[in-house]
Image (tube, rainbow, N blue to C red):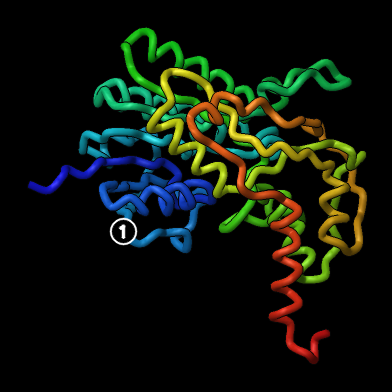
Amino acid sequence: MPKKKKLIIVTGGAGFIGSNLIEQLLKDKQNQVISLDNYFTGSVKNHIKGAQYRRGHSKDIAKYIPEKPDIIYHLGEYSRVAASLNEPALVWDLNIHGTLGVLEFWRAKKCKLVYAGSSTKFNAPGKNGVFGRDLAPYTWAKAINSELIKNYATWYKLPYSIVYFYNVYGPRERAGQFNSAYGTVIETFKQNYLQGKTHGVRRPGAQTRAFTHVYDTVVGIILAGSKGKNDEYGICAKEVYSILEVAKMFGGKIKLMPQTKTSRTSESADSQKIKALGWKQKHTLKNYIAEIKIKKIVFTPLNKI
């Protein structure tokens, strides 16, 4: 008799991290994956063969997914700090209403939940005395969602893991800077480099990040799902670079831009808990940028050099 497949739900499965997660999950032939995405920042270009895709708001998850899953990976939320200051109502809709819908679904189905929290809540106060969790509507919503999940687990005796990401980069990133408020730093710099455009760096440029490859990130997410037990897990690279250092690593012209209200510095996080589950960092930002440069040289026509 064939072994029953494990039913997995990934909210935000058509997004950057969600699509990479689904791709890794489907390497196990015993996994069946359903994605629920409203395509706010997700794309059909990110669809992975073998997964089912359903379009809808996460607050209506019970309507779109009547099946009983074994596990839910909840990644489908609004995820930009600075931009959230301009659209708090949208953050409330996607990250408060949406996540409450997922939590009620979790309570009804009594499965395991893995929630993608925001590492910004761990940031120390800046010069203005504001803690990371209070920087913007996005950071505040993510912080209270993490607290609510822990309370749901206590109130209703439910299993969960909360994972924290640190400036994830890699395949299927979304570029931004001058054309999108939802772009990521590394992909924006990558596209600037490939197209010969100027890198825009917010002043002072010394603000640091621990950039973590998406492949390392999704391995950590899956470990937290399979082995994590009602705890929080940081998935973070050990190397830390300033934004200005990263721009210089890519090369090209740099333009210093006005500082934003949400400008912040973050360091490498303690990943001991996820390492205890078997996680190891396998990728570095330096190697990633070096590979991009090599590919540009290899694929650039002679008449373009």
Q: Which residue is mark 1?
A: 50
Q: Residue at x 76, y 57 (%)?
A: 189
The image quadrant that residue 142 belongs to is top right
Q: Is residue 264 above or below residue 54?
A: above
For the question of whether residue 26 can be seen, the reply is: yes
- For the image, the number of numbered tags is 1
Q: State the residue in front, 172 or 159.
A: 159
Name the amino acid, label 1.
Answer: Gly
For the question of whether residue 179 can be seen, the reply is: no
The residue furthest bottom is: 303
Q: Is residue 105 left or right of residue 4?
A: right
Q: State the residue in front, 151 or 85.
A: 151
The residue furthest left is: 1
Q: Is residue 19 above or below residue 208?
A: below
Q: Secondary structure at mark 1?
A: loop
Q: Is residue 256 above or below residue 250?
A: above
Q: Residue at x 55, y 42 (%)?
A: 217
The image quadrant that residue 69 belongs to is top left
Q: Residue at x 64, y 39 (%)?
A: 80
Query: Residue 76's spot in the image, x, y percent?
Result: 47, 39
Q: Is residue 12 left or right of residue 282?
A: left
Quarter in which the C terminus is drawn: bottom right
Q: Residue at x 31, y 41 (%)?
A: 8
Query: Residue 111's spot in the image, x, y percent?
Result: 29, 26
